[in-house]
Image (cartoon, grey):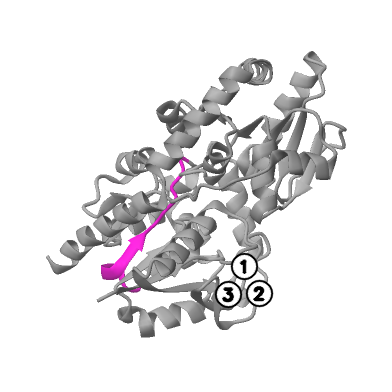
Amino acid sequence: MKRRIGFVVPRYGEDVLGGAEALARGLAEQLVAADLAEVEVLTTCARNHHTWANELPAGASVVQGVRVRRFPIDHTIRDLQRYEALHLRLIRREMLSEQEQFEWIDQSAHSPALYAYLEQHGHAFDYLFFVPYLFGTTYYGSAIHPERSILWPCLHDEIYAYMRPTRDMHRSCLGVMFNTYPEKRLAERLYGRHPGAQIVGFGMEPFTADGARFRQQHGIDAPFLLYSGRLEGAKNVPLLIHHFLRYKDANPSPVKLVLMGRGPEKLPDHPDILPIGFRKGQEKLDVYAAATALCQPSVNESFSIVIMESWLAGAPVLVHRDCEVTHYHVLRSRGGLTFRTEQEFAESMDLLLEDSVIRQRLGENGRAYVCQEYGWSQVLERFQAALHVWDKLRSA
């Protein structure tokens, strides 16, 4: 008999940006496609995680074969001014008192209608997966039926991970599903070992792409470094732009920086910085194939889909060494380079631009790593093994 699985995620949809949201969508779609479980996604009507406006209609629908049930965000229960004051202190890495930590969670985006649905119907699911850890819907939703709640935290080494509500949530759920070993190691360091901790990861589909097609369509002949993701400070985009422009000043060359994605970051008006907006489907894959290399400057990653996509397209990656997860992927795969300082960034750029043999070898190594470790067959096998572990914990 197939299990009934629910995914509770703050935002959901094909045009919703965010790594955790993409992880939830990918696994839900694969479970349905493989007929391994009855799946329903429980989410809000919000599309944008800055405004939390109810842009999408409430109610049930089907998205890429997956049943989705949306509930409105209730903005009347929030003191937005208080939330922003607390959040600003967290952004500055100022730890709040425990009372303020719970207040911050209380003032985040909430959907009482979603909580009511979980109260009334949550027992009908074998397991409820809550992703990611940072939102009120995860904190309050997972507490309703903790005996069947699986936290999928997408945990980063950031100030929010050190807060009391995060620790309590991690310890109270039946299970915790991690994307990588470094993420699990971080959780153990912060909260201790969890009997239901399992590493599953995320599946990637091999694809074909045509980099020349993208270059021809956009008139780009020069080599370019690609960034793919949200354009915001939390992803270290300002650092990438700074290092790139400093590199250009010291090394005049035709190389460009292509920024693929959307976000609030104000971009400089510079002829060598090319923002191309959000791309999806084959067009997005063609961009990866056209890139000389991808740079992932973020230090807050629990998996990083974009470096996997880059490797599948045959392009090497350049990652920030202070991100334990992406550094781990690069070391295991031998599919890229790492940097911490501006000088290391420049040296890596020199190597990637000047040595096509090394560039090709790094890309090939990365592709082999993704296919071996993160094909959907391997990931679904690990997921099913994790379900058996949680079954035993529930029946104990």
Which residue has dot 3 on it? 77
Single out the residue that lies furthest toward the left: 396
Q: How would you rate the neighbour count of disc 1 (Cα within 10 Å): few for under 14, some for 14-19, many for 20 or more? A: few
Which tag is nearer the camera, tag 3 or tag 2? 2
Question: Disc 2 marks which amino acid?
Answer: Asn
Question: Is residue 143 in sight in this rendering?
Answer: no
> Are circles 3 and 1 on residues that touch, CB within 8 Å?
no
Q: In the shown orientation, is residue 347 left or right of residue 134?
A: right
Residue 1 x, y percent position in the rendering? 24, 76
Question: Mark 2 = which residue?
Answer: 54
Sooner in the amino-acid sequence: mark 3 or mark 2: 2
The correct choice, above or below, for 120 with respect to 196 in the image is: below
- Whether residue 362 is situated above or below residue 9 in the rendered picture: above
| Residue name at image x 58 percent, y 75 percent | 77
Q: Main secondary structure of the magenta part?
A: loop
Image coordinates for residue 24, horizontal then vertical, percent: 47, 60
- Compared with 146, 233 (above or below) is above
Q: Of the residues shown, which amino acid type is indicated by label 3?
A: Ile
Residue on which disc 1 sits: 79
Q: Is 150 colored magenta in this rendering?
A: yes
Few, some or many C-alpha atoms within 10 Å of disc 3 (few <14, some 14-19, many ≥20)?
Answer: some
- C-alpha span from label 3 to label 2: 15 Å
Q: Position of residue 123 (x, y in %)?
A: 30, 80
For badge 1, the amino acid type reads Asp
For the residue pair 369 and 237, the one nearer the viewer reads as: 369
